[in-house]
Image (cartoon, helix red, strand yellow):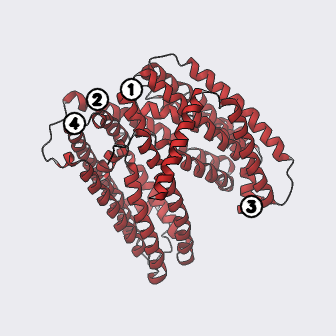
Amino acid sequence: MANKTRSDYTMLNIVSGLGGYMVTFVLGIVCRMAFTRVFSAEYLGINGLFGNVLGMLSLAELGIGSAIVYALYAPLAKNDNGKIATLVRFYGKCYRVIAIVVLVLGLALIPFLKFIVKEPPDIKESYYLIYLIMLFNSVSGYFFAYRSSLLVAAQKNYLVTLVSNIVIIVQNAVQIAAIFLFENYIVYMLIASVCGMTTNIIASEIAKKQYPCIKEKHPAPLEKEEKRSLIRNVRALTINKVGGLLVNSTDNIITTFFDGLATTGLASNYTLLSNSINSLLRIVFNSLNASVGNHNALEDNEHKYSLFKSINLANFWIFGWAAIGIFVVSGDVVSVMFGAEYVMDFKIPLVIAINFYMVGMQNAVWTYYNTQGLFRRGRYVSLITAVINIALSILLGKAWGLFGILLATAISRLVTNTWYSPYAVFRYGFGMSVKPYFIKYVFYAVVLTVTGGTCWFACSLVNFIPIVNMIIKVVICSIIPNFVFFLLFFRTKEFGVLKSFVIRALGKVKKLIRR
C-alpha cells in the first residue's frame, strides 16, 4: 500500500472528524431526549456539577499532551523508532503520575461533597457512588491517552475517531435501551464507563500495531536536556492554558453578579450557537496540526510561511463567514427555537460575533505556535489577558451589563493575544517581520466589516414569519460573503493553494465513497 501524503492524512482526519461530530451530535440529542423522559433534571444537575469538579482536577494534565505531541513530530517525520519509543515511554510515566494525582485529589474531595451539594438531590442513587464512577472514568483514561496521542502526532487521528464513533453508536443504542428497561442511572453510567474503556483499549492496541517499537520494554532513557526542555514546555503551556481557562470561565459568573441568572440564561442561547459552530470549525483546523507539524519538521521558513498564508486565508474565509451569520441570523434562530421573548438586542450577537471571530482568527497562528514549539514565548500573556478581562468586565459590566462584559473580553484579547501570538510566530518561528500579517489582518477586518454591514442591511428588509426570515437570512449571509471573498481573493496564490487542496480533497472523498 502506498504511503499517504500529508494532505491524505489531513483529509482523512477532517472527514472522520466532521462525520464523527455529526454522528455524536445527532445521537447525543436522541439519547438526551430519552434521558429526560425517564430521569429528573436533578440527574443532569449532579452530572454537570461533578463534571465541573473533575474538570478542575484535570488541570494537572495541562500542557503535557501538547508538549509531547510536539516532541514526536520530528522523530515521526524521520522514522526514528528509538526516539519514538523513548518519548512514548516517558509520556506514559507522566500520565500515570497524573492519574494517581487526580485519583488522590478526587478521593480527598469526597468528605467535602456534602458542602458542595448543600441540599441532597432528589435521586434514588447515592451521589457519592455517582461521583466515584465519574472519578474512575476520569482517571482510567490517563492510562491510555499517551498511545492515542502518538496516533494524533502521526497524523492518524482518523483511526481513533473511527473507533470512537463506532463505540459511541453502540453506547448510545445500549443506553437508550437501558434507560427504558431499567430506569437506573447507575446502569446508564456503567455502560458509559465500559464503552469509554473499550475505546481507550482499542485505540491503544491500534497504536501498538502501527508502531511496534513502543512495545519495547527498555528503550533508551530520555536525555537530561530533552527532559528539561519538555518540562519547560509543559510549564509554559500550563500557564497559557490556566490563563485561557480564566478568560473563558469568568464571563458567566460576572454576568450573573451584575445582571442576574436570567440574563446569563438568555445569553447562553446565543453562545450555544456560536460554540457549536466553533466546535465544528475547529475540527477542520485541529486536523491540520499534525500535518503542519510534519511540514515544519522537514521544510524551511519560506515554505512554512507560504503554507501559513494559505491556512490564514482559509481561516478568515470560514470564520468571517460564520461570524456574519452569528451577528445577523442568531436572533432569528433563537426566535424559532426558543421563542421571540428570548431574543436579545442586536448588540449582544454583534459582540459575541466579534469575540468568535477574534478567537477563530487565531487558529492559524496557534497551529504554528504549537507545532513550532514556541510554548515559552509569551507564556504569561494569557494570564495578563485574564487579569485585564476580569478588571474590565467588572468595570464595564457595572456600566453596560452583559454587553460591557462581552466587550471587555474582546478588548482584553485585542491588547494581548491578538498581537503577541502572531509576533512570536513570525519573530521566532519564521524569522521575519510580522508587519505583513498585521496589514493583512486589518485588510481582512475591513472586508469583513463592509460585507457584514451589507448582509445586515439586506436582511433588515426581510419581514415574514420567523422561520421564513431565518431561512432567507441564512441564504443571504451565505451568498454575499462567499461572493465578495471569491472576487477579492480568487487571483491570489493562497487561493490557488486552497483550490488545489479542495479539488484533491473532493477526489479523495469520491474514492472513499466508491470503496
Label 4 with label 3: CB-CB less than 8 Å: no
Residue 378 x/y as whole percent: 45, 26
The answer for how far apart the CA atoms under marks 4 and 2 are is 15 Å
Q: Secondary structure at mark 3?
A: helix
The answer for how far apart the CA atoms under marks 4 and 1 are is 20 Å
Disc 1: which residue? 299
Residue that extends furthest to the bottom in the rendered view of this protein = 181
Residue 390 appears in the rendering: no
Residue 500 x/y as whole percent: 54, 37
- Is 46 situated above or below 235? below
Q: Secondary structure at mark 1?
A: loop
Q: At x 32% / y 58%, what residue is drawn?
A: 200
The amino acid on which the numbered mark 4 sits, given as a three-letter code, is: Lys
The crowd level at tag 3 (other Cα within 10 Å; few <14, some 14-19, many 20+) is: some
Number of marks in the image? 4
Disc 4: which residue? 83
The crowd level at tag 4 (other Cα within 10 Å; few <14, some 14-19, many 20+) is: many
Mark toward the start of the polypeptide (4 vs 2): 4
Q: At x 35% / y 28%, what residue is drawn?
A: 298
Label 3 with label 1: CB-CB less than 8 Å: no
The amino acid on which the numbered mark 1 sits, given as a three-letter code, is: Glu
The amino acid on which the numbered mark 3 sits, given as a three-letter code, is: Val
Q: Nearer the viewer, residue 405 or 241?
A: 241
Disc 2: which residue? 229
Q: Nearer the viewer, residue 513 or 23?
A: 513
The answer for how far apart the CA atoms under marks 2 and 3 are is 53 Å
Q: At x 61% / y 45%, what residue is drawn?
A: 254
Q: Nearer the viewer, mark 2 or mark 1?
A: 1
Mark toward the start of the polypeptide (4 vs 3): 4
Disc 3: which residue? 336
